[in-house]
Amino acid sequence: MTDSTSGLKLGTTLYSMTPAFHGREYTFEQLVRKVAAENLGPGLEVVGFQSIKGFPVVTDEYAGWFKDLIAETGLTLSCLGINADIRIDPDKPMSDDESVTYHERQLEAAAKLGFPLVRYQYPAGPAVIERLAPAAERLGVKMGLEIHAPHHTQHPDVLAYREMYERVGSPMLGFIPDFGASARAVPPSFFEAQRENGIPEDLITLAQEFWHQEGDPYARRERYIAAAREKGYPDREIMSLVIIFGLFSRAAPESWAEIMHQVIHIHGKFFDFDDNGDEIAVDYARVLPVFVKGGYSGFMSSEYEGHMWNDADGFDKIRRHHAMANRFMAEAA
């Protein structure tokens, strides 16, 4: 655990333990207490709709209980994940007015629970977030756009937000880099899971070849699909691998420096470790110094996402991630 009050500090998002929570191995309270007991804070990130029944409605009783739990465990609230859900009704997308109301209720919940900032999602759109800036200022809750693969700092979707931020000039608007956007490889465990599902090795090799090519990830995905079909692979097998083009991107770690002055939180995405304790898919020895030397001051939530394809122990993974992060942070200091 990092004890300093400034600089990059470590924490955990409960999203990392999604299978254990959904499988009812732990209650929400037990997860929070275990994060504290395992010394995996001090920062604690929660996804509102995943962890809080009835969210974004938060009663006075629940808010009091929640704050008492955080005080008792000694954790520090770092970030609340909120949703855009603009197509919650697939037949009628939300209007901007409806989206503003939907987000404002979640901002109010974050403020009532004591979170200093929220992670919002890019489908909300710059126009909606601009309209929410006054509410964020009134409530004292910062709003951070998660820059998640396949996005990056120069992606047109992100540039639209960057331009709006500069025009609005609100200190409550910022960014949350997700390190899955700076991957150097696809996690080995993903391909191991696909092999167990009967996906041929030659098809896995083909997908990796297209993943490593240059250019737009979705264009590479379409080229992969076309090449795989030409080779005669069935769509069931082909489509089992297309997620790699959207979930893992190859933006240069140094590119995060462009928005460092507006970074308010970090998602330390990770998946697998090698025998030296280093993350295989994300080059932490390269990406963490960008933030340490760039003067970032705030939390990094350890975010394990390998649970999408395996049942590894999220707590064990986070312990490894914290150990690795502390090592690289010390070297970069």
Image: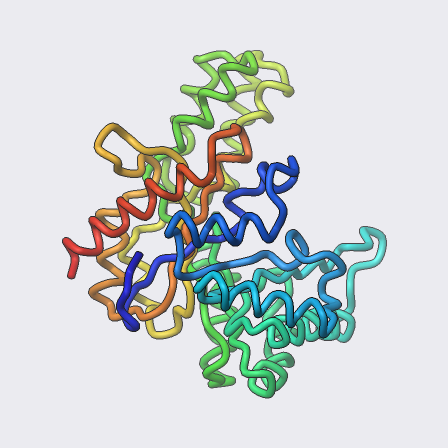
How many numbered markers are drawn? 0
| Residue 184 percent coordinates (x, y) | 32, 39
Q: Does residue 178 appear in the picture of this structure? A: no
Query: 89 or 327, which is in the foreground?
Result: 327
In the image, residue 188 above or below residue 81: above
At 62% from the left and 62% from the top, the residue drawn is 82
Who is closer to the viewer here, 74 or 294? Answer: 74
| In this rendering, position of residue 234 left or right of residue 182 | right
* Residue at image coords 25%, 70%: 295
Q: Quadrant of residue 176?
A: bottom left
The quadrant of the image that shows the N terminus is: bottom left
> Residue 216 in the image: x percent, y percent?
45, 45
**Residue drawn at point x = 57 percent, y = 22 percent:** 238
Farthest residue toward the front?
72
Query: What residue appears at the point 65 percent right and 38 percent down from the top-left corner?
Result: 24
Horizontal and vertical percent position of residue 51: 64, 54
Rendered location of residue 304, percent (x, y): 45, 42
Residue 49's image quarter? bottom right
Is any part of residue 120 visible from this angle?
A: yes
The quadrant of the picture occupied by the C terminus is bottom left
> Which is more toward the observer, 37 or 238?
37
Is the residue 238 above or below the residue 289 in the image? above
Left or right: where 12 falls relative to 327: right
Q: How is the image coloured?
A: rainbow
